[in-house]
Amino acid sequence: MKKYLFIDRDGTLVTEPHDYQVDALDKVKFEKNVIPALLKLKEHGYTFVMVSNQDGLGTDSFPLNTFTPAHELILNTLESQGIVFEQVLVCPHKPEDNCDCRKPKLGLVMSYLKDTSWDRENSYFIGDRPTDVQMGQNMGITPIRYGAEGLDWDEIADKLTTRARIATIERNTKETKIKISVDLDHSGNSSFDTGIGFFDHMLDQIATHGGISIQAKVTGDLFVDEHHTIEDTGIALGQAILQALGDKRGIGRFGFVLPMDEVYAKVFADCVDDDNVTVALDISGRPHVKFDFDAEFTRDKLGQMPAQMVPHFFHALAVAMGLTLHMYVSEGNAHHQVEALFKAFGRALRVALARHGNELPSSKGKL
Ligand SMILES: [Mg+2]
Ligand SMILES: [Zn+2]
């Protein structure tokens, strides 16, 4: 579906002069970084439409022969840099003319409003005045007030090209009822209620050290035992993170060290070493899990959480998320062993999820 940016001209693309009329070539001045921003937006699939009020255009107070050269200079300059407008819509009337096309009235954009084929959810009206905001609202799309609270073109381009990485998974079986929400770009605001205190504490390690937000509400058949609750939480959490990742553009892919299916190689000295534990993680789409524990857990149970459910949890999560995951833990106190594994997993996840630019970190073009 086509997504549109309807954009005001004066005060938004070019600077508005004190007398509000861009009627001479030396009054044409582009707003800061508008061209790189529009190029970025174009690269992300937006189509541009200019929507401008030019009060009294064609009358003695604003003759066409003073408007047109400046207007053409604006359009030609933008076009020379690869920015074209599907339509350039101009209302030439004054407020007292009571026309149907002066923003925020809808006359100029009527053909777009009648067309149901474009993506209203992801289209925006960008302008510097309250009437532009009203115009966006009247069109049923989100308005963006350029210049309000310093909102500039760099920020607008960032905002409209960065998808929120959030997801909610609801998973209901006879054994468990689960609702897990994640936000990969915000930390804090996490909550855990699985009915197993120690497990809640461990999930909190993933959120805290992963720098992400997780809300998990799990009602499981704890009257049987803890197995289903822990395993199914792993599955749902893996699904939620995977869904929030979307196409995985811009992510780091690797954790601190480099795993490749059953082979596991430390590539830098800064691998996760937390209480003698190492976690290697790759969001590969080819799940492979390897536990390389030097020692058995020294206790069978941590609070209400069976120690043997620790690898089982990570296995379920890794398979659901398509992770290559190698985990190593050394000998020690069982609580430390388990907590260190969850912390290190969070730390590796933080690096792997961090987003830098828009590149897909795979030579295959797919993850
Ligand atoms: Mg304006
Ligand atoms: Zn008009």
Image: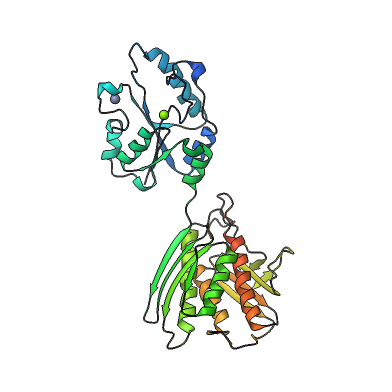
Residue 160: x and y in percent read 46, 45
Left or right, 76 with reference to 54? right
Coloring scheme of the render? rainbow
On the picture, is 353 further left or further right than 20? right
* Residue 282 visible, this angle: no
Quadrant hosting ligand 1: top left
- Nearer the observer, 216 or 191: 191
Of 14 and 353, nearer the camera is 14
Measured as percent of width and height from the top left, residue 341 is found at 62, 74
Which image quadrant is residue 291 in?
bottom right
Task: Residue lying at the far top in this picture: please name it.
Answer: 60
Answer with left or right where residue 363 lies relative to residue 100.
right
In this view of the protein, which residue sits in the foreground, 362 or 187?
Answer: 187
Q: Is residue 143 visible?
A: yes
In the image, is 215 to the left or to the right of 258?
Answer: left
Q: Is residue 272 above or below residue 78?
A: below
Total marks placed: 0
Q: Residue at x 52, y 42 (%)?
A: 155
- Please identify the quarter of the rendering in which residue 344 is found: bottom right
Give x and y (percent) for residue 296: 65, 86
Residue at the limit of the structure toward the right, as seen here: 269
Work out whether residue 157 or residue 95 is closer to the camera in this orientation and state it: 95
What residue appears at the point 28 percent right and 41 percent down from the top-left corner? Answer: 115
Residue 325 pos. (x, y %): 60, 71
* Residue occupying the point 60% across, 66% down: 209
